[in-house]
Amino acid sequence: MKPKEKQNTVELYYMEARAKLIDIAAFMDRIERDGFTDDFRYKAFKDALRELDSENRAQSVLLSLSDPTEELIPFATTKAACGAWPDKP
Amino acid sequence: MRYIEPHAHMVSRTTDDYMAMVTAGCKAVCEPAFWAGFDRSSAHGFYDYFCQLTDYEPKRAAKFGLPHFSWLCINPKESEDVKLADEVIALIPEFLKRENVLGIGEIGLNKNSRNEMTVLEKHVNVAAENDQLILVHTPHLEDKRKGTQLIVDLIKSDSRIDPGKVLIDHVEEHTAKYVMDAGFWGGLTLYPESKCTSARAIDILENFGSERLWLNSACDWGVSVPLAVPYAAHEMRRRGYDDDAIDQVFYRNPVKFLSQCPNFTVR
């Protein structure tokens, strides 16, 4: 699917993406300033940043933050997801 | 514009939301059964909930001139208790006779556990035995990739189920291809943080094709936006799409899928 009139997507999205990039930088500064760098979610977040050098960045970031196993777990101990796989080495 | 809201938990929303949706061009709203935010203590609670979805809520929507349809199930978040699930699933066939019911949903997995899978299989069996459409919830965040593949593989292996009558919801960039390649419909959910933004949803339409995808707000009692669907239509317009393309994605696609159920009619 493609638009009939292709728009300049840098024009459309640059300022929004710039703001999000600065937010990420500030988030990392905050976590490091407050000493929570050992949290598995922060480690997963930093790992996922490396995927920005890949070709399919959104897909690669999502996969980096996903449970890579294939088997059903014995039973659910919680209902919530946390956004990163806790058992990632 | 005109649009269908194919996934909204309106029992959690206010009449202001109904008014806003109708004003924005909503022509029908579809409400899957879901988790209330707490575990119900017995099957009686589900009986009352199914009455709400098939009787009271359609009347509330009708006050705003909005046709309301529903899907029935016990949500995967409550599937760890298989005995309770059996009792709830036994209630469903009686409610399938109600005139606003579209099928079985939103079934699926939450944490990808054995009991969740057992209950998913039981729901799929009810759908097959009663020739119902299926709406599937895929897990959140880190559990989505694995859960989506387990769900797709399970339903695909059941020869009684036509993939064209199944919609796998909450797909994202890492799961859309697996769903589409298996012949299912896919749903893109527009959430501020935990699922897709409008811009990403349109990227997915561009990358994976728009023929078997719909967009929904999945608005409920959590952080969600009941007008997310028309907002996404606005985003498509900003990208240069014309009215016909927007109508295809936001109206004709959901109507095509939902019209496979004889109960679904839209003026």
Image (cartoon, coloured by chain):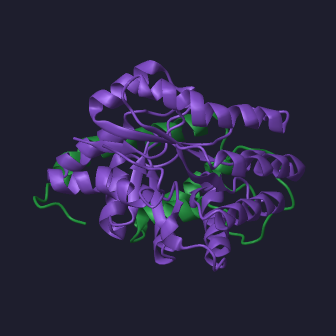
Which residue is drawn at the image coordinates 30% and 55% (left, top)?
B252
Which residue is drawn at the image coordinates 50% and 39% (left, top)?
B8
In the picture, which chain is purple? B
Residue A28 appears at what percent x and percent y? 53, 42
Q: Is residue B221 visible?
A: no
Of residues B137 and A70, the one nearer the viewer is B137
Residue B199 appears at what percent x and percent y? 32, 50
Residue B133 appears at what percent x and percent y? 55, 60
Which residue is drawn at the image coordinates 44% and 53% (left, top)?
B188
Of residues A43 and B13, the one nearer the viewer is B13
**Chain A rendering hue:** green
Residue B165 appears at what percent x and percent y? 51, 66
Image quadrant containing the N terminus of chain B: top left
Q: Is residue B60 left or right of residue B212?
A: right
Of residues B66 and B14, the one nearer the viewer is B66
**How many numbered circles are shown?**
0
Q: Is residue B136 above or below residue A69?
A: above
Residue situated furthest right in the rendering = B83
Q: Is residue A2 left or right of residue B220?
A: left
Which residue is drawn at the image coordinates 16% and 50% (left, top)?
B243
